[in-house]
Image (cartoon, rainbow, N blue to C red):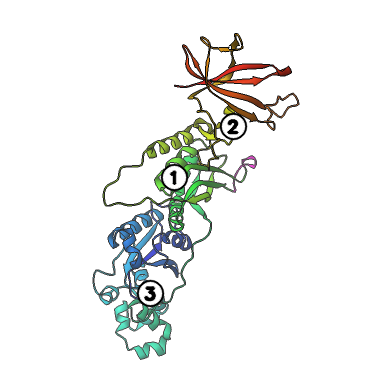
Amino acid sequence: MLGHWAALFPHSLPSSPSPIDAASLGTWALQFTPRVALLEDAVVAEISGCARLFGGMEQLRLKVHAGADELGARVAWAPTATAALALARQGAGSAGQDGFRAPLARVLDPLPLHAITAVGQHQATLARVGCRTLGDVRALPRGGLSRRFGKALLAGLDQAYGLRPEVHAWVTLPETFHVRLELMSRVETAPALLFGARRLLVQMAGWLAARRLGATAFTLRWCHDVMRAKDAGTGGETTVRTAQPMQNVEHFSRLLAEHLARVQLLAPAGDIELLASEVASITEESRSLIPETLRQGADTDLALERIQARLGQASVQHPVLCADHRLEWMQYWDSDRVRRARGSEPRHALPLPTWVLEEPLRLIERDHRPHYQGPLQLLLGPDRVEGGWWHRSSNAEDARPLNVQRDYWLALSPHAGVLWVFQQRLARDQTAWFLHGCFA
């Protein structure tokens, strides 16, 4: 089938840890098009139907080349899958040959026999009759080729030149992401693992983009060399979390680098694994013809994530609302920056104060009237808050109950302004007034 085919041929580069396997390369390519297939030892993808989604064919080509360079794969383009694979095999040391720069027959004819597998299988015999290139084979009588070498040779040639349709089994996207990479040499320091882990992060970003998901946590595992100390164990792992679902490889790399900087390997590592442990749906931002301002707070979130990765999980905390009527327990501080579904806020008849005392302050009473920097004038109330019978200060036997029975009021002080006070029942039907908060 004629179209716009890309062939990605795995090979080793000086800047690459080791050659990537075709299955992992096919999973990465699925972010660009669903028409991805494994062809022999490479991956082919038909992308003409999805080019407009990436801003045109040239923009899509740049994206494919950039990702393939990081993964250690050559890329070639041609109107057929077999032709693209033949060009990719011969594109060593270049950015990838282009089968569209001239008529397809003129591009393929100079290639050697082993560029197409069906022809390369008979290379020794064809060489004895004077064939050195694919063009030489095409010049031979087709009847004699079919009788001497079988129909497979002619079928391979015809499919490469677009004279016969190709049939492919399309690759399906896996439900989970878990890949493994064998390092070219043993790594003795944890920060050096980032060199190989970046390739896995590129693959994970491709898998996330294809599934329209974002990672909120991913885990890097490393396996120690077999020649290790007995107390070193088989390996270790580190988990990186993000505040929101993301697909950004650069941000993943920065966070992972901060985590690895605080890790000490107990033995040299020879293999690494990457697992997308927690994923969530990602919200696509709408595109407008008019330039939009950047989302407020985006840089702050990224900076806080880096601080948390560098200084530890508890270094950055944020408030979490709770569905509780007691003011002391309406929120708590948590170091997990993953956004959670917030509980419904309890409704109150009175406005809540701006500032709350850590411990309520008992007020003096004169003539059955609370005083704080002068006599208080009760403005609004009461608002009854009663609950917490299930709550204890600890799990010990001497733990005190945290049940409250309070009547809240808005009160006006001659000098302190508007205050939030409550009257609480004490033992033997006694009551007392407390100051709990104030308004700015």
- Secondary structure beneath dot 3 equals loop
Amino acid at dot 1: Phe
Q: Is residue 31 magenta?
A: no
Q: Quadrant of the image for the N terminus? A: bottom left
Tell me the number on the disc at residue 374: none
Residue where numbered disc 1 is placed = 252
Indicate whether 418 appears above or below 288.
above
Quadrant of the image containing the C terminus: top left
Q: Earlier in the sequence, mark 3 or mark 2?
A: 3
Give residue 116's mark: 3
Task: Decide which of 152, 273 is in the foreground and name it.
Answer: 273
Instruction: Give me the C-alpha separation between circle 3 and circle 2.
Output: 74 Å
Q: Amino acid at mark 2?
A: His
The image shows residue 145 at horizontal and vertical percentages of: 37, 87
Q: Residue at x 55, y 24 (%)?
A: 381
As shown in the figure, which amino acid type bears the numbered disc 3?
Ile
Report crowding for label 2: few under 14, some 14 to 19, many 20 or more residues within 10 A (C-alpha).
Answer: some
Q: In the image shown, does 26 or 261 lie closer to the viewer?
A: 26
Which stretch appears magenta? 226-232
- The alpha-carbon separation of the residues under discs 3 and 1 comes to 39 Å
> What residue occupies the far left of the structure in this picture?
102
- Which mark is in front, 2 or 1? 2
The answer to whether 142 is drawn above or below residue 235 in the figure is: below
Residue 187: image location, x then y, percent: 50, 44
Question: Which residue is disc 2 drawn over?
Answer: 325
State how many labels appear. 3
Q: Earlier in the sequence, mark 3 or mark 1?
A: 3
* Residue contact at pointers 2 and 1, CB within 8 angstroms: no
Cα separation between marks 2 and 1: 40 Å
